[in-house]
Amino acid sequence: MRYAGSPLRVSRGKEVQIHSGRIREYHQPKKPVVSNSLLLLILVIEALFIGVLYLAFSKETLTGNLIQTLKSGVFFQPAQQTPPASISADPLPVLLGVYPSDALQVTYWELENMDLWLNEEGVQARISLAGTYMDIEFHNPEYNVPAELNAAWNAGYTPFVNLTAYQHTAAEVAGDPAVEKSIRAWAAAYAEWSAQGQRRAFIAPLQEMNGGWVRYGMDPENFKKSFLKIQQIFREEGVAEDAVSWVFSPNGWSEEGHEFERYYPGDAYVDIVGFSTVNFGTCPDYIGNWDTYDLVIRPYLERMQKMAPGKPIFLTQLATVNVGENGPDDDLKDEWLMDTYTQLAAFPGVRAVLYFNRLKSEGSITNCRPVDWRIFDAYAEVAFDGFLEAVRSPRFQYWSPDSAGMTEVAFAAETPGSFLDAWPAEPFSGKEDPVYLEWIEILADLRIAPGCSAEEYSILGTTITNHYFCPQAVVTRADFAHFLVLALHGPQVNLPAAANRFTDLPPDHWVSPWVEQLAQDGLQLECSPGLFCPDLPVTRAEMAALLADAFFLPESNNPGPASGLFYDLPANHPLASRVEQMVQLAKTGGCSETEYCPDKEITRAELAFALVSTFELYQPERLSWYQAELRLVHE
């Protein structure tokens, strides 16, 4: 085990000391104490003694101007300012991850060398995640699965496994018994290694599934089935829930029609969302673009945040070349690394960045062979200062595999939700639950939360049903009638026969019995004479007026005259008196201090809140239908 400040041992037994951008031999020089009076002399003889000086002085000893001068020399890249991300209010850190040049069993020491580099350069962070690729048909899994994972774990890194199936289509993974046998062998080996949650790993099944460059790609439905099947097999083979954090890891870019949102299995089955993205620069013949953070990272982050707002985000594979429009340029790569890591550290919910630190031949790329993605390599004298300076930010921290951060946050169990699209936030995301979640769950607990859709999968003989609430979908008048009857009468309501009350609502329309129930309750439901308008969106003012009438049932509602409380809802507005009545009852409020936004269409989440607030559904024991249900249960 190396101690801080010890040299790396590389080929032919030479000892080297690492500096930004270069690796230089040294002979254990003594560390002189130099006063400020010698600083001018140091500048003059910089070319001869730059390596010794950097070893001798900490950055805190030298003035900022001198550091800037020294770093403009031959051995250093230009100095960078402290990343703005260092003042982030995010309570959770960003973890560093790296893919070494080959399997962890034979190259884990590359991560140790990188950690040594970071340590000797005064960086507090070190690598937390060790990236690897392991196929479901990994040869001799009972040996190789634990050997690969232990190579990371025993060196102080949590494994990040891309669980691939390079020889199979998604349909074969989802349905072929022979493939299932391979998955079971892999899962059994993992179960033994993880020892009921004593060891753990991040696992990303069938990564980059939305790309045509993998055989299992471009098949969203069978990918979802495969994802769920792999999880089911892990459970059946005895893998503890807290031994795996499941990662959804598509490619950022995709062909039209294969956007990663189409492949998302759902919040109930995914712990972490992430994506791969790289900057090829001008290496490919078919494109020639220097892809920055704003082009190939931020747009995907924003989409992932919208798709899964309560999930932590990983950059599951990040890399850049140094080849721009004017050819190889290390400064350009340094700038890219500095900007990208700084921006990622500041983006809400980003929890890890795994860098693809490899020299790799890419079959479709002819201009750069092999493609050099590396940011550090002790043997090849590669060390990019842009990465080094960016990760000085305190936003980047180290969590060991057994740390409280890993065990109690990153791998913490979540509280399940009732709907796949209205799900509690993961603890590792650092975010609060969606504001509407509590309202929806109150309705769901009372069994009066009709979903917007459902889908079923048959996985290994088990039927899995996913329910969706569509919290941001606009509420139609038909939807409103459905919800309102459930709130007034409960899930056991006996609906009356449909009637021909409205010319646009025939008796065989699905909502007709629900509308008939409200009519019999005494509510006026016309949108205009003789019409119900079932598909018309409900506005804020309409919702408040209908809820006001429903609130006073079985009595009729007699609101007083309106006073013009909101300037966009004058007193002579036909719904103003009932809206103001609900405001006085503290059942609704304006969209601002002076506006009500009466014509704004409401969402299903907003309706959930309005129902809970109006009928005080958080105290169900006060509801007559709830009391009746309790009596039936006890009888």
Image (cartoon, rainbow, N blue to C red):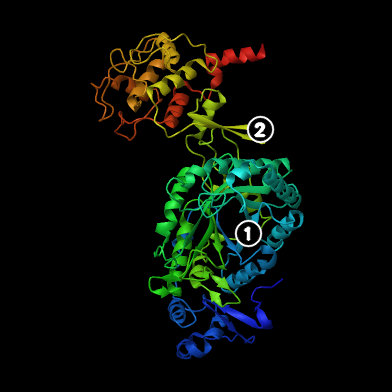
For the N terminus, give its image quadrant. Answer: bottom right
Q: CA distance from mark 1 to mark 2?
A: 31 Å
Q: Name the image quarter holding residue 473.
A: top left
Residue 227 seen anywhere in this rendered image of the structure? no
Closer to us: 498 or 461:
461
* Left or right of 477 on screen, residue 38: right
Q: Position of residue 211 (x, y in %)?
A: 50, 52
Q: Position of residue 63 (x, y in %)?
A: 46, 78
**Residue ID at (73%, 48%):** 185
Q: Amino acid at mark 2?
A: Thr
Secondary structure category for the residue under label 1: strand
For the C terminus, give its image quadrant. Answer: top right
Secondary structure category for the residue under label 2: strand
What is the number of the mark on residue 132?
1
**Residue ID at (66%, 14%):** 634
Q: Residues within 10 Å of mark 1 (few under 14, many from 20)?
A: many
Question: Mark 1 or mark 2: which is in front?
Answer: 2
Task: Please say if the residues under marks 1 and 2 sit with CB atoms less than 8 Å apart.
Answer: no
Residue 558's place in the image compared with 168, above or below, is above
Q: Amino acid at mark 1?
A: Thr
Q: Earlier in the sequence, mark 1 or mark 2?
A: 1
What is the number of the mark on residue 462?
2
Q: Position of residue 5 (x, y in %)?
A: 64, 76
**Residue ID at (59%, 87%):** 32
Closer to us: 434 or 462:
462
Q: Position of residue 520 (x, y in %)?
A: 42, 8
* Left or right of 324 on screen, residue 594: left
Q: Name the image quarter holding residue 478.
A: top left
**Residue ID at (34%, 24%):** 536
